[in-house]
Amino acid sequence: MREFHFRLQSILDVRRYEEDQRRLELGMISSRCAALQREIDHRRNLRYRALTVLEPGERLEDPGFRAAQAAYARRLANEMARLERDLRSAEEERLEAVERYRVARRNADVLNRLRERRATAFRRKEKQDEYRRMDEIAMSRRMRHGSAIQ
């Protein structure tokens, strides 16, 4: 039986490579978004602890402590705002990467489905040809044995 050969295999390989590249790109951007979100959560936790949790021996009425506490909280809030802007930008970039991945996936899937249909048709035709050849062999044997018997 002959082996199936898809004439567009090289194009399918390129499209699969493109899909893999888009998947990797999407993964990197998604991990960046997750890292930014963790940083924001960490800063939020630090800010909450700085404003609410007191260590033993700390006094609320100390103006120097209150000023340092407020300055630290402002710095953390500014960092959180910057990180949130970065996160919004990264989320937009992630959405664009998702769309690029969908397009690459769709392009590869179209060729892959075409390859599967052609491979199925090829196997069906090969099986029919094999049955036809077997019938021809059986007929020729019957003809030879039938003429020898008479």
Image (cartoon, rainbow, N blue to C red):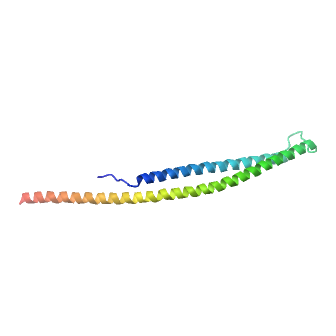
Tell me: 100 left or right of 127: right
* Count of picture labels: 0
> At 48% across and 56% down in the image, what residue appears?
108
Q: Which of the 4 quarters of the picture holds residue 113?
A: bottom left
Q: Which residue occupies the foreground of this view, 9 or 4? A: 9
> At 86% across and 47% down in the image, what residue appears?
70
Give the image location of residue 128, x and y in percent: 28, 60
Give the image location of residue 58, x and y in percent: 89, 40
Tell me: 133 left or right of 146: right
Tell me: 111 left or right of 122: right
Give the image location of residue 129, x and y in percent: 26, 59
Q: Is residue 52 visible?
A: no
Q: Residue furthest top?
A: 57
> At 7% across and 57% down in the image, what residue appears?
148
> At 46% across and 59% down in the image, what residue appears?
110
Tell me: 39 left or right of 148: right
Q: Which of the 4 quarters of the picture holds residue 7?
A: bottom left
Quadrant of the rendering where the C terminus is positioned: bottom left
Q: Is residue 21 visible?
A: yes
Q: Which of the 4 quarters of the picture holds residue 119?
A: bottom left
Give the image location of residue 33, x and y in percent: 66, 50
